Image (cartoon, rainbow, N blue to C red):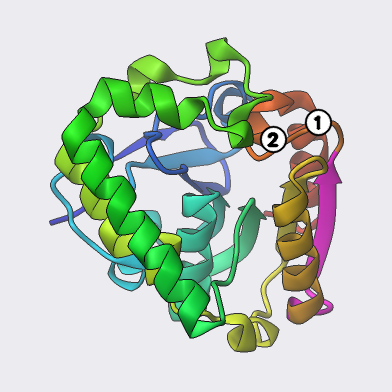
Amino acid sequence: MPLHAERRGHGPCLVLVHGFTQTRRSWGPVADALAVDHELICVDAPGHGRSAGVAAGLSEGAHLIADQGGDATYLGYSMGARYALHVALARPEQVRGLVLLGGTAGIEDPDDRGERHDQDVGTAARLRDEGLEIFLEGWLRQPLFAGLPPERAFRTERLENTVDGLATSLERAGTGSQEPSWHELPGLSMPVLVLAGADDRKFVALAERMADAIGDSATLALIAGAGHAAHLEHPDRFLAIVQPWLSAHAL
């Protein structure tokens, strides 16, 4: 079953892959700005939005995203960054450039990864017990999203999701299910922009490590005064980094 996607704009192709509980319509001013000179393909990731019925792990989901995106630059946020990274590793011939915001190449320690998987499964069970609206309220109250303005939380768009879709996404594509790929990062030869909000300490450390592992093809940038959802907290600062980078690499 193919993923749902919406296209807009004209120019070089740019595929946007959202974070957990978001949808294709959760990009706000970032998509508006990028669509001025790019063709955007905004996908609903497996288990989300109009792709709620698609149950897939990261590897299978990456192929489904690549089927929609084709030859393009792939930009992913959080869960979407993990999907975009998997696209680049599995089908590098289709990836002209790669932008990763708040991503990771996985948890290496098997015990830690197993503990995280148990946590993901527990969160999925809580979601099924609470229902969508109550779960989303709690999800957005996490310290991770403390800097996210209410008008850019896209609550209405998140309510397009389903309990079963999101729960299955957690179980199959959560960080606890992600096989670590740090050893594969040096093989990425396309231009890669690795981003994190400067106040998102955990993901700053991950971004620094990812950029170092990728090597010369990687550019590391931190978004000042921003947390995990840096592109929505400070879209102008995010775009001030991403747009010149795209132009510099003719992407």
Q: What stretch is highlighted in magenta?
A: 214-223
Residue 215 screen position, x and y as percent: 81, 79
221 in the magenta segment:
yes
Q: Disc 1 to disc 2, how far (Cα)?
A: 9 Å
Amino acid carrying label 2: it is Ala
Q: Earlier in the sequence, mark 1 or mark 2?
A: 2
Residue 138 screen position, x and y as percent: 42, 27
Q: Which of 226 and 40 is in front in this view?
A: 226
Q: In this view, does 102 lie above or below 116?
A: above
Give me the disc on residue 230: 2
The residue that appears at 37% across and 36% down in the rendered structure is 21
Mark 2: which secondary structure? helix
Q: How crowded is mark 1: few (under 14 residues within 10 Å), some or many (20 or more)?
A: some
Residue 65 screen position, x and y as percent: 35, 58
The residue that appears at 83% across and 47% down in the rendered structure is 222
Amino acid carrying label 1: it is Arg
Give residue 206's quadrant in the image.
Answer: bottom right
The residue that appears at 74% across and 26% down in the rendered structure is 234
Q: Is residue 127 above or below residue 111?
A: above
Q: In this view, does 10 lie above or below 211?
A: above
Give me the disc on residue 237: 1
